[in-house]
């Protein structure tokens, strides 16, 4: 069974950058669309970004558009989220999730059946 594993979280100052990675500890991501979600304390999980299985379609949440970039390297079975100009409101646990949806991706948690355990991102001075 497909198992995403996130890494790359940490503590960063406002304005800084982090790159998150999502690798498959079991199975391959090649035929799955992949999304990043985040959840701050006391808030619902929200979609950050997603990428289609072939990489040709990407989507971003309004709050991160222009600052975050999602990419995938199918040869390495890894998806990346480059996060620049980080703000305190970006703080939360970031989750990687996989969906068998072909050709496109959705930022809707109900579309994703495979989830990682999450990685903490804290933006604070």
Image (cartoon, rainbow, N blue to C red):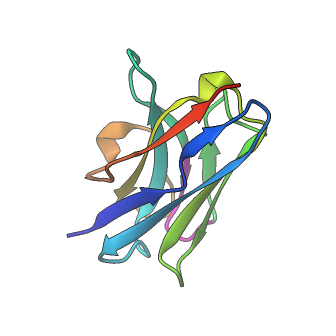
Picture coordinates of residue 24 (x, y %)? 37, 70
Residue lying furthest front = 125
Residue lying furthest left = 1
Q: In this rendering, is residue 102 above or below 111?
A: below
Residue 123 falls in which quadrant of the image? top right
- Magenta stretch holds residue 38: no
Residue name at image x 61 percent, y 34 percent = 61
The C terminus lies in quadrant: top right
Residue name at image x 49 percent, y 46 percent = 36
Picture coordinates of residue 83 (x, y %)? 69, 46
| Residue 18 visible from this viewpoint | yes
**Left or right position of 121 against 44:** right
Picture coordinates of residue 28 (x, y %)? 36, 77
Picture coordinates of residue 4 (x, y %)? 35, 62
Residue name at image x 48 percent, y 57 percent = 7
Residue 57 falls in which quadrant of the image? bottom right
Magenta stretch? 49-55
Residue lying furthest bottom = 75
* Between 25 and 113, the one nearer to me in the picture: 25
* Between 101 and 64, the one nearer to me in the picture: 64
Q: In this rendering, is residue 35 above or below 78?
A: above
**Left or right position of 70 against 114:** right
Q: In this rendering, is residue 31 above or below 79?
A: below
Tag count: 0
- Magenta stretch holds residue 54: yes
The N terminus lies in quadrant: bottom left
| Residue 100 visible from this viewpoint | no
Residue name at image x 38 percent, y 22 percent = 44
């Amino acid at each position: 069974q497909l198992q995403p594993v996130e890494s790359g979280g940490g503590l960063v100052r406002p304005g800084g950058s982090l790159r998150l990675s999502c690798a498959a500890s079991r199975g391959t991501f090649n035929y799955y669309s992949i999304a990043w979600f985040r959840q701050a304390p006391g808030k619902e999980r929200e979609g950050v970004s997603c990428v289609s299985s072939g990489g040709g379609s990407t989507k971003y949440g309004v709050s991160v558009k222009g600052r975050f970039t999602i990419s995938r390297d199918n040869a390495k079975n890894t998806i990346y989220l480059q996060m620049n100009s980080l703000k305190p409101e970006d703080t939360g646990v970031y989750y990687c999730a996989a969906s068998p949806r072909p050709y496109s991706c959705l930022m809707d948690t109900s579309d994703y059946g495979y989830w990682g355990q999450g990685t903490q991102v804290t933006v604070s001075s």
